[in-house]
Image (cartoon, grey):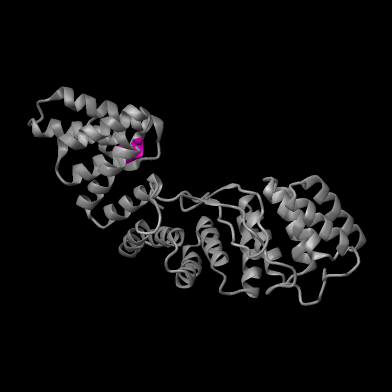
Amino acid sequence: MPAHSFNRHTAPTDHPRASRRLLATAGGTLAALSLLVGGCRTSPNADGADPSGVGTIGGPGHEHIVAGETAMDAGNNAAAIEEFERAIAINPTLTDAHLGLGDIYRSEGDYNKAEKAYGDAARVAPKNFDAQYYHGLMLHLLDRVTEAVGAYLKALSVKPEDFQTNLNLSVAYYQLGESSQAYTFGERAIKIDPKNGPARVNLAAVYADLGRHEEAVTEFQQSFELVESTPRILLAYAESLKTLGRYGEMRSTLEQLVKTVPSAAAWERLGYAQFKLADYAKAGEAFEASLKLDPDYFPALNGVGVCELNRYYWSNSTDNDARQRGINSLRRSLAINRNQPSIEALLGRFR
């Protein structure tokens, strides 16, 4: 994966659920986009509910489910938890009671307790879509990604064309480094909802990881029409442009980025683009701007080093000050990150 592409430790997004709203959010990112983790789950016995009738209206303990949902709607989570637990004590197979507990704990950001509650619901009602999906989501948010994949697959066995499950499953496979599988589900998510910006961004990241940069660029560009781009997305887009040798577009993208959200990485990548376009003076300025923001950003130290050594060559090997500045910059870079064989080899030519 390119150094400036997507971080594999992104969190999944939430699923739109059709009936009652949860007054809950949690920070989540998909391909560097901040999205909501909240929403509503389907009502009892909706499509995907357990066909055995577990937890149907009027069964033993159901009155506590009704009381729990009433308390939760009133914002009294403590009372709601008590009611759902009473329902479970009467009948441990009451799916809606487990789901209710999961919803409350999720709304409070207690993903460990929510995972247990949704997991109990999934075991009680393996064909309940909400139980399987939300169990997967909690596992995903807890960074138990391999387990999340299993839960998402169970959810898809109930609703194969569910957009959010396909998208989250693609993200999970991407995080695990299984980009071929990530592509399968990411492409399916796009077919279900072609106008979804985060799905386009996700698929672009997957394409880039597969080395399919032309397609990655196309997906990035389509996403720009649908969602506001973040610095991380623009850096990843620039990285694909770099791989394709489209340095002019890379420069334009990064020039806009450093004007709005300057960072060491953005300035360093801009310097790289300027260098490839033979604008060596501006390349050096960009590398220096990167180091002003982060003096230990070793890619920018490499850029400065190369610029200074080029200056030495252009002086017919007479500008020894430039030579020493280049050597010092590369040495400092290697002191920060020893795993740079190409830089070490370059430096070896000047020892």
Q: Quadrant of residue 274?
A: top left
Residue pictured at 81% horizontal, 75% vertical? 53
162 displayed left or right of 263 = right
Residue pictured at 78% horizontal, 57% vertical? 69
Where's residue 198, x and y in %?
Answer: 45, 58
Where's residue 2, x and y in %?
Answer: 38, 50
> Which residue occupies the extreme left position in the image?
316
Residue pictured at 66% horizontal, 64% vertical? 19
Up the image or down, 196 lies above or below 241; here it is below
Please give the range of residues in magenta. 262-267
Where's residue 182, x and y in %?
Answer: 49, 64
Q: Is residue 348 visible?
A: no
Residue pictured at 85% horizontal, 53% vertical? 83
Pick whichever, 141 or 27, lies toward us: 27
Q: Does the magenta-highlighted stretch encompass residue 291?
A: no
Main secondary structure along the magenta-highlighted residues: helix
